[in-house]
Image: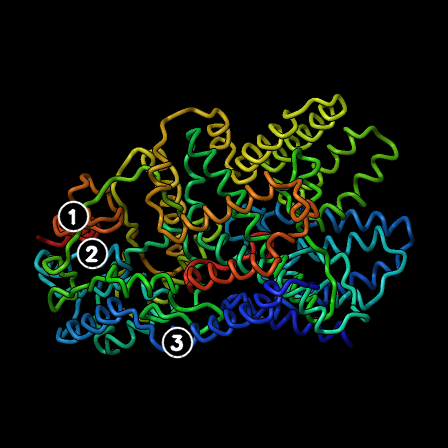
Amino acid sequence: MQYTGNVNRFLWYFLVPILIVFYISFIFWSDKNFVNKPVYEAIKNKQQAINSLESIDGVILGGSNAWWGISAKSLSVYSDMIWANLAIPAEGYTDKNYENFLLETLSQEKRQEVSFVVYSAATLVRNDFMKRKRVSTNLYGKNQVSYKPQRSLASYLKDSMGFTGFRPYPVENKYGDFGFANYPCGSFKANPFNPREYLDDNEISSWASNQLERIFFLFPNATVFIYMPNGFNDQILEKNNHRRENLLIKLQDFLFERETNGGGLVYLLSQEPYRSSRLMCADDWHANDAGRAWRTEELYQLINDKLQFKK
Amino acid sequence: MKFLILWLIGAFIYFFSINATELTFEGIIVPLSFCFLTILLIRALSEKHKTLFAYLLFFSTGILTFFGIIKPLTGSVSESPNILFFGFSFYTLSLAYLAKNAKKIDFLDTLKISNPALLATGPIALFIKNYRYRNFYHRFNYYMPFFIVGFFFFHIIGVPLAPLFKFVYLTDAVSSIVFALIFELFLYANFCGLSLMLYGLFGIIGFKIPLNFKQPFSSSNIIEFWRGWHLSLTAVLKTMFYEPLRKRFPPSIALLGVFFASAMWHGVTMNFLIWGFFHALIFLVTIYLLNRNIPILPTFALIMAFIVGRIIFAEKDIDILMEKLVFSFQGFGILSEIISLPPSTKASLLLGFGIITIEFFFRNMPIVKKRNYKYLRTPFSLVFILIITIILINSGGQNFAVYGQR
């Protein structure tokens, strides 16, 4: 590149190197100063709350759909047992992170006492099984240092101008439930242009094997429920319902085959879609307080149908 | 020795960029061993058997997709379910090309073909030449801008668009067209971006590899378009299908053969067969129109090929594909979804379509006409690109090579 103009020389030999040096410096600065405060505080508060439970009979596992949408306190009341909501944002970003979180939160003794596990698996309705393997994010949402900054310069500029989008995720009680009293949900608008991506057929068995191996390692004495979450029902999702049904059939076949081969009984549950947008908290996957009450009751009935608890 | 070092650099890039727990040592050792053994076999074969073997290698990717051992290319994450087949579609094509085309196959070719960086992203390693006459200073000045432009394409335009793949499930006319346009832009930004990055990086190190894209949108018809899109594959198809078929058949049959072969390489599925036939048809119609000096219609046919072609390319479920191709109008709801996208995604769309607009509408300007991204490689453009990159880039999104990995 033989540039002859003085301006071009200035740009190429002076300004471009300065920008590159600035970019590299920004990467290190961003790495040093990055804290995903809402997620960090939510996890710490949740661990602290659940540690106060002396024993736990049932646990709810999953990501934000389960944290927003299932109340461990209500399940405890319904079943006359002690449940803990161990769902955390993005399920810890990777399966390994989530496993470490569970190991860190519950002692071996407590884990062995757990009789029921409800795993509300967003991967089934997000198809992010392989994606979750690729990310190098820690439990609190911080990525490994790389050639890209943790956050964009634009987002830092936005923060500095007071347009910050961060809101804390409160923990409501000792069961680890989400605290809606201190969280403004905002309005929810049904979005027919946000269709779901269900787990690929050829990934069902490896996903289910991985998850069940992990769950039984952590909770060796538990009865496990794989619980496929749902969102708000709208026209497009109705149209794609065959995908959901197809996945449920294939997953059920896998679980049946596993049981036949001596792998133990695992129940498959499917959530009904939320019936009203008034049950939602600004997102197709996140229930509000009323949505959580409805979903928890539905979950309890589904479990009860299988195990015949008494309400 | 130089090519061994380049292979090791490629392995380093592979591990650095893929950064995934499931991609392991086999991902680089299996291609190396396969290429070595195949070259050993090719050298032992007679000329006639060598040609037959070349076609077997070419179609091996299609055969494996048919049996589900590797995935057909869909545009979304295309990692192979089996790490043992990492890069298979690329190195088998390189081997097929060499078996069919090269007079002499060297064991040194093993290191070139199985370079892990090229297998992860493309282009197909048809050649890697060592520069002996240019010093580092000149190489850096020439190739660094390619790297910067590629980085910008991949990270700033391509990565933020991946979440929009969810639109593939929408079947109404407006949504299908919007998805097709976004998908076209994504494929371009992703594949071209990675190809330019490697072209720049290898050039700085001192090696010339194929320039895989040459401003494909600086075209007024589909013939010009294919002179700028995925050129390493085009070279293989030309050598292995167009030229031999053209010796015996009219151009229409030769073109059908080329697009059939291309479709099979992408995956043995019905949608790719339709896609290949559709592109061949548009190609033939364009030749007809150009021969009769009919203006504008070839450009219209090109736009049709973008939109309808990408709808077909991306949808492997035939029932849904047929539903889309009915183009039933159900309103403009998708546009409000576009408006509510995150600012970084909107910026990507704006920048991406801005670049395509420049390539298309200014294609006769001297700086654009050469079709080598010169208009983006000027110092002024580079400063602009770097500033935009620094402002927008973040660690979110998915880094995957849309044509690589399988």
Estimate the spatial distance between the alpha carbons at disc 3 and disc 1, rounded to whole Å.
41 Å
Circles 1 and 2: CB atoms closer than 8 Å? yes
**Rendered image: mark on residue A233:** none
Determine whether A43 is above or below A90 in the image: below
Splitting the image into 4 quarters, where does residue A144 fall? bottom left
Q: Position of residue A199 (x, y in %)?
A: 41, 50
Q: Nearer the viewer, residue B394 or B366?
A: B366
Q: Are marks 1 and 2 on the same chain?
A: yes
Q: Residue furthest front?
A: A6
Determine whether B346 is above or below B327 in the image: below
Q: Position of residue B17 (x, y in %)?
A: 54, 67
Q: Regarding mark 3 in the picture, which secondary structure is present there? A: helix
Q: Regarding mark 2 in the picture, which secondary structure is present there? A: helix
| Residue that badge 2 annotates | A68
Task: Give the left or right position of residue A261, taking residue A268 as reference.
Answer: right
Residue A267 shows up from this direction: yes
User: Who comes first in sequence, dot 3 or dot 2?
Assistant: 3
Residue type, label 1: Gly
| Residue that badge 1 annotates | A291
Circles 3 and 2: CB atoms closer than 8 Å? no
Q: Nearer the viewer, residue B93 or B186?
A: B186
